[in-house]
Image (cartoon, rainbow, N blue to C red):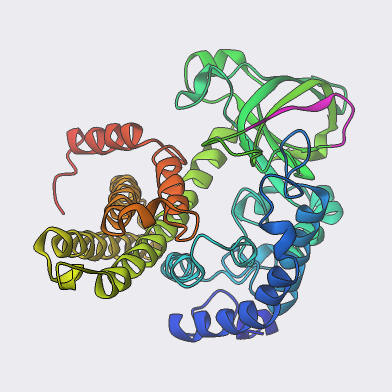
Amino acid sequence: MFAWARGEGAGMDLVEVDDLTAGLARFVDSVVVPLEDENAALLEDHRGAFYTERGGYSPAVVELIRQTRMESAKAGYYAMFCPTDIGGGGLSRRMELLTHEFLARRYGPARLLPFETVAHWAFGPSFMCSHFSPALRSRLLDDIVGGRVGMCFGMSEPDAGSDPWMMSTKAVRDGDEWVITGSKQWTSNGPHADYCYLFAVTDPTLVRGRRGGISCFVVPMDSPGVSVDSVIKFFGDAGGDEAILSFSEVRVPEENLVGTEGEGFKLALGGVSVGRVYNSGRALGYSQWALRQATEYAKSRVTFGKPIAEHQGVSFKLADSAMEIYAARHAALDLTARLDRGEVAIRELAMTKAFCCETMLRVADRAMQVCGAMGLTNETYLYRVWHLARTLQLADGSSEILRQTIVSRLLKGELDF
C-alpha cells in the first residue's frame, strides 16, 4: 500500500513513477493476471459466454471486473488519481499519464482486467464525486471509491454529440424530486453500470443561449423508467460496452443533483479534460507495445536471405513510428507539467490528445504492415490496437473538434509555444 493510502501526506507525489508502476505491476501480476488466466475460457469467448444475448458483458464478466476493482481499491491503487477529499490519492496528472501508458505498454490489448485496476473518471471515483451533496456522499461514495459499484456517463444523445447544446433530455423539478425524460447514446459502460451520471436540461432558456442550464444527476440504473434499449457493437463484434439508454419520467431526489443546478456542462468539460490525459497515456502505451511487436517480428522474419529489418522499406516504418512516439510522448509530458502547475492548457490538451491518438493509429497500421499477413491475425492482437486507435479518434473529442479548439485558441492570440 502506498504512503498516501496510509494517510502520510496524501496528494503529494511521494513515490517516483518507476516505484509506483513497479508496485502496480507486482499487484497485477500476482492478483489480477492469475484471476484473468483462471477465467481465460470465459474472457476469450467473444462469440459466446463473454456477452449476453443482447450484447452486453455477461454477469460473470461484470463480476470479474468488480472483483478486480475491489482488490485494487484494497491495495491502494484504484483511486490513487482521485481527489483527496473523497479518499483518493490526489497524485499528479504526470503520474496518471505515465501509469496508463505503463499498463498499455506492459499488458497490451490481449488482456481486460489489468486496465480495471485504476479508476476511469466516468466509470468510478473521480472529481465528480467531490461535487456530491452530503446525503449522496453518505449513501454512495464508499461504494464508488471501494470499487463495489460502477458508473456510466450519460451526456451524448442521437442529436447532441459534439454539440451538447442540442441536448433534449429534460429534468423538471417536482417538489423535492426531479423528473427526468430523454435518451442517451454512445454511453460507455452503460450496458452494465450501477449508476449513471445523467445530464439533462433544467433551464431551456440558458441552453438556447449556450450559457448554461444543463445539470447533472446521479441516477440508479435500476430506477423505474430507466431502460437499456440496445447495446452498440463495433467492428463486427458480437457485443460491446456502449449503450443506448432511455429515461421515462425517472424520479430522483434533490440530493442526487451533482454540483450546482445549471452548471453540469462545466463538470462534463472537466471530465473530458481528464479523459484526454487518460487516452493520451493509453495511446502512448499501446503504440510502444505495437512497435515492439513489429520490431521483434522484423528481426526474426527472414526474406531474400536476411531479416526483413535490414530492408529499408520495412525498417523505415519502424523508424517513423519511433520518431512519432517520441514526439507524442514529449508533448504529453509537457502537457501534464502544465496541468500540474495549475495551467488551464486547453490548446495543449487538444493538441496532445489528437497527436497521441493519431500517432497510435499510424503506428498500429505500420506494425500490421511490417508483420504482413500475420499482422492481421488474431494471434498477434495488432488488430485490437488498430480498433482501439480508431475509436480514440472520436472519444473525448473527435480529431476534428480538437483541431477546431486548437484554431480557436490560436485566433485568440495563443501563438507562443
Q: Is residue 359 visible?
A: yes
Residue 175 in the image: above or below residue 338: above
Q: Compared with residue 319, is residue 166 higher up or lower down, i.e. above or below?
A: above
Q: Decide: is 286 above or below 369.
A: below
Q: Which residues are magenta?
A: 222-232
Image quadrant where one finds the N terminus: bottom right
Residue at left offset 28%, top offset 63%: 334
Residue 205: quarter of image? top right
Foreground residue among 268 and 236: 236
Q: Position of residue 2 (x, y in %)?
A: 62, 84
Q: Is residue 115 left or right of residue 31?
A: left
Q: Is residue 230 left or right of residue 290?
A: right
Q: Residue at x 68, y 73 (%)?
A: 32
Q: Which residue is more in the foreground, 328 or 30?
A: 30
Residue nearest the viewer, comparing 102 with 64:
64
Residue 119 left/right relative to 166: right
